[in-house]
Amino acid sequence: MDKNSKIYIAGHLGLVGSAIHKNLIQKGYGNFVLRSFSELDLTDQDAVAKFFKKEKPDYVFLAAAKVGGIMANNIYRGQFIYENLMIQNNVIHQAYLGGVKKLLFLGSTCIYPREAAQPMKEDSLLTSPLEYTNEPYAIAKIAGIKMCESYNLQYGTNFIAVMPTNLYGPNDNFDLEKSHVLPALIRKIHLGKCLENNNWDLIREDLSGRPIEGIDGTSSENEMLEVLGKYGLVKHKDGNVSVEIWGTGKPMREFLWSEDMADACVFVMENVSFDDLIKVSEIENGEVRNTHINIGSGKEISIRDLGALVKNIVGFSGDLIFNINKPDGTMRKLTDPSKLHQLGWKHQVEIEEGIARIYNWYLE
């Protein structure tokens, strides 16, 4: 890419897309074409075709997706597979028809089998069954990987797929029903601290910015307590406050600061081609597979220890209650980022620093 290249970031307002946009601006890029969901519905094939014919971007970052945590993945199974397949198919195909020079497709490490050997290498893809709770989303992302590979092999495109681990950072989703584990923990433990301090002004401010099931800062204290209780935030008669966390707390998770992820994505877009990936991927008998790239820290932490870390950083003195009747999800999801290291990139922000940063961002 050169600094005047026309760059389309699909999903530029989300956690991933906004971090990529910020990184590109910091590196001196300035010719962006951006559309919010209300301006361009990427599931609409005709609208996407018209957009690409009109704008003719040189480079595309495909960061738009229907995303969520274990609860949302399990409840909205049809939406997760349909919307993600439609977004990917429309953008990738129009990028091919429009002669886009390079496309970066962002997936997720949930593409790997539930029982994949740890840490997960790229070649563990499709070797055994997926985790059931996020299977529809994972299948959509696997289809995106294979679409990029297949278009490269048939049409000579330069479409690269990257699989970031669990991300967190500015512009994250803090919706208690649909968010991932870390932003959900940060918000719940923050609200738990407000409850134990009887700080109803902060609770009202929080709910005014992010209502829960229609309950906002104008609701009564009883209404707010009721909806918070539904999501595991309870103020007991003795004044103590408890915060519920799904599962046993034993699953291990890897986390990556979103701005580190963005830096990796821009690095790949600037320095890596599909031909490079063929050279560093395990190609057997002439069969080109698993040319996607893991983006991760290669480090993991248990959900129990993660909760304790957030609790300490937020300054909450109540109890963390693990609901063992709720699903754990995959027990381990640690990536092997050695391919990315081999290509020349490594993460910078460790989990303790990152949680402090995102909590300060949330408060602001």
Image (tube, helix red, strand yellow):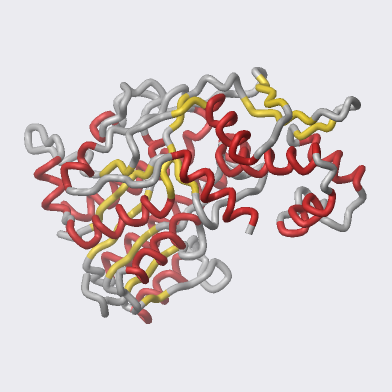
The one nearer the camera, 151 or 124, is 124
Q: Is residue 286 left or right of residue 100?
A: left
Residue at the (25%, 57%) spot, across then down: 267
Can residue 74 be seen here? The reply is no
The one nearer the camera, 209 or 56, is 209
Relative to residue 307, is residue 13 depicted above or below?
below
How far across and down, in percent of the image, does residue 170 sit? 52, 56
How far across and down, in percent of the image, does residue 62 sit? 38, 59
Relative to residue 96, is residue 174 depicted above or below?
above
Farthest left residue? 285
Q: Quadrant of the N terminus?
A: bottom left
Q: Is residue 97 left or right of residue 284?
A: right
Can residue 260 be seen here? The reply is yes
Q: Is residue 150 left or right of residue 49?
A: left
Residue at the (38%, 62%) spot, across then down: 91
Q: Quadrant of the C terminus?
A: bottom right
The one nearer the camera, 186 or 214, is 186
Relative to residue 245, is residue 211 depicted above or below?
below
How far across and down, in percent of the image, does residue 116 sit? 34, 23
Task: Residue 287: name its quadrant.
Answer: top left
Residue at the (34%, 48%) spot, across then down: 144
Residue at the (24%, 55%) spot, across then down: 268
Q: Is residue 130 left or right of residue 126?
A: right
How far across and down, in percent of the image, does residue 139 sit? 41, 39
What is the count of numbered marks? 0
